[in-house]
Image: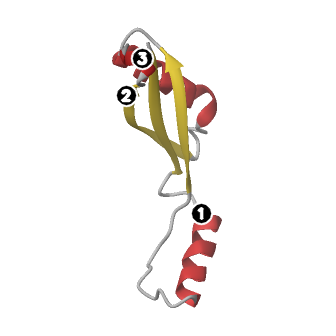
Amino acid sequence: MTWVAEVVVQLKPVVNDPQGLVVRDGLRRLGFTGVRAARIGKHVELEVEADSEQDARESVAAMCEKLLCNPVIEDYRIDSVRATAEGRA
């Protein structure tokens, strides 16, 4: 069965985010003065083959820990894992 997993990788709160600072400052210059902070991360969508949703989640977590996320400075979360239309056949 094919599953689609959506993963978000972001810098840990204690890590400076220079891209976030640039975005915040740019938004303020454009008149969005209420923007107090901005953090930049990565959105990763993966299609994986697995027998169950749990197996897909475990596989995606392993991918995050081995490649997609630098655990020293980043955290990740798996927002969703859903069967594809083809996977529901």
Identify which amino acid the numbered label 3 is placed on. Gly
Which residue is identified by label 1? Answer: 17
Q: Mark 3 Cα within 10 Å, few/some/many (few <14, many 20+)?
A: few
- Could you tell me how far apart the alpha carbons at marks 1 and 2 are, in whole angstroms? 31 Å
Percent across and percent down for residue 80 are 37, 35
Q: Residue at x 55, y 53 (%)?
A: 41
- Could you tell me how far apart the alpha carbons at marks 1 and 3 are, in whole angstroms? 38 Å
Which residue is identified by label 2? Answer: 82
Work out whether mark 1 precedes mark 3 in sequence or the reverse, and give the earlier one. 1
Which residue is identified by label 3? Answer: 87
Q: Quadrant of the C terminus?
A: top left
Work out whether mark 1 precedes mark 2 in sequence or the reverse, and give the earlier one. 1
Percent across and percent down for residue 6 are 46, 37
Dot 3 lies on which element?
A: helix
Pointer 3 with pointer 2, Cβ within 8 A: no
Where 55 sits versus 46, above or below? above
Identify which amino acid the numbered label 1 is placed on. Asp
The quarter of the picture where residue 25 lies is bottom right
Dot 2 lies on which element?
A: strand
Q: Which mark is residue 69?
A: none
Work out whether mark 3 precedes mark 2 in sequence or the reverse, and give the earlier one. 2
Dot 1 lies on which element?
A: loop
Where 63 sits versus 34, above or below? above
Pointer 1 with pointer 3, Cβ within 8 A: no
Where 7 sits versus 65, above or below? below
Percent across and percent down for residue 83 are 38, 23
The quarter of the picture where residue 64 lies is top right
Q: Residue at x 46, y 29 (%)?
A: 4
